[in-house]
Image (spheres, coloured by chain):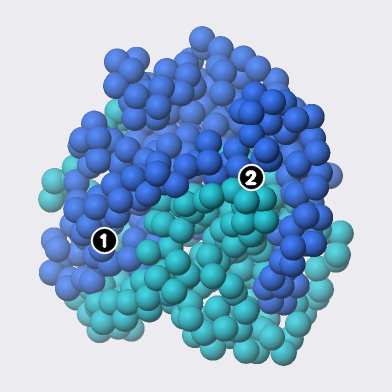
Chain colours: A blue, B cyan
Amino acid sequence: MNPTMQTLLAHRSIRRYQDKEIGEDMLNDILTAATRGATTGNMQLYSIIVNKDKNIKQQLAPLHFNQQAVTEAPVILTFCADFNRFIKWCQLRNAQHGFNNMQCYTWAVTDAVIAAQNAVIAAESMGLGTCYMGTVTYNVKPLCQLYKLPKHVVPVACITIGYPAETPGITDRLPLKAVIHEEHYHNYSDNDINDIYREKENSELTKQLLETNNMDNLAQIFAERRYTKQDNEHFAKELVEFLVEQDFM
Amino acid sequence: MNPTMQTLLAHRSIRRYQDKEIGEDMLNDILTAATRGATTGNMQLYSIIVNKDKNIKQQLAPLHFNQQAVTEAPVILTFCADFNRFIKWCQLRNAQHGFNNMQCYTWAVTDAVIAAQNAVIAAESMGLGTCYMGTVTYNVKPLCQLYKLPKHVVPVACITIGYPAETPGITDRLPLKAVIHEEHYHNYSDNDINDIYREKENSELTKQLLETNNMDNLAQIFAERRYTKQDNEHFAKELVEFLVEQDFM
């Protein structure tokens, strides 16, 4: 197996970091790798905000629900879908554009996430640890204020990077066949679902979770405890309002 | 520089392929690498449709505006944001969910693109070539029909994979500083924009494009020729209607 495959297969999220800076050369290589990813029509429809300042990380932390990784990691990278730079260029060159819609927003989201994943893989190839902060799409309005985002810029991915202070095992995944569809989508029967989730539902981790949460099954922990309908709908409303403000909807 | 960094920095899109199959073991490794990427709460909110059948690739081609790569590449992978599997699981386990909204759709999109980029890097590390088909978000309704996608599934990324039949150089990028913002977003002045785009605007490739297209500048080629307001708004409308049909809006 080649070294890149080894890097990819060894991925795990690192949430605890050593109190040790990342060298400028390393960070520069990580950012350069991010920009080498494919982008829609080579338009590079993203921007990367680099946070190292302790004071700003303190302000950022509550927007990520005070996850320890945000204050502990030496570097936080926030990848934004960005049509602002490209639109400014078009305006300056008297080019009549139509980029303020959901189709174009989707291109920019894809560009930003590809760049983020390249940064993750680059960092991991150097022995650094990373973790995606999925919370980046929750508090988009205060995040926009903190980062001074102009119209046509939306945060879509955030990663913490640093030297690991923990060595977790790799996380379980569904069997490969559960996510693969040959030629077209084959919808799941009840038996398929039981089969796919069996191993996950019977793991030691799940047993501990059920005990701690005092709930009947793992699906309920996900749907009724971790990602509740009330929370999801609140943050969906915030996100949609923000997409309207940013001129994409 | 480590081998993974070399893979990342050597990325280029490959649009022409040799008439040579990809071995099952290689494809299996690529798909496994895709599933090792980070996913929101380890929910794996994506599915991967694998196309190898020549007949289906012929039907797929017009939905990608007959790009040659679609019929020439031995393997096409279409990554879908997928909450169908997870919601079916919740329903079967009597877990009350609230996943049918734009916040949850965003998680699934991110999961799908991370998986796609892992597949790209895995394939490239084995000497294969890849190309993203950005057109995957254009004709979402006929694509949904062809792929028999149920509710809560949306195609978001598509890659062609095969042995390269061309050896293009790596593509130009804006200067690194153009996409990096220290601590917060620093908006661009007119001078900044001129500075950022100077090299791109003065390249040989641009000079050829201006001559071929008979237009004043590169921004106009992007905004008024390649990605016109009329097209973008048409495909945005199609996409939004589809997101409503798929129960995310």
Q: What is the three-letter code of the residue carrying label 1?
A: Phe
**Secondary element type, mark 1:** loop
Across and down, in percent, residue B56 comes to: 69, 86
| Separation of residues labelled 2 and 1 (CA atoms) | 34 Å
- Picture quarter with the C terminus of chain B: bottom left
Residue at image position (20%, 35%) is: A145
Asked if the residue at tag 1 contacts the one at tag 2, i.e. Cβ–Cβ closer than 8 Å, the answer is no
**Secondary element type, mark 2:** helix
Q: Is residue A222 visible?
A: yes
For residue A6, which quarter of the picture? top right
Q: What is the three-letter code of the residue carrying label 2?
A: Ala
Observer-nearest residue: B203 or A133?
A133
Across and down, in percent, residue A242 comes to: 25, 50
Observer-nearest residue: A130 or B48?
B48
Mark 2 vs 1, N-terminal side: 2
Residue at image position (75%, 30%) is: A207
Kindly identify which residue carries mark 2: A219
Relative to B91, is B192 above or below? Answer: above
Which disc, if any, is residue A248?
A: 1
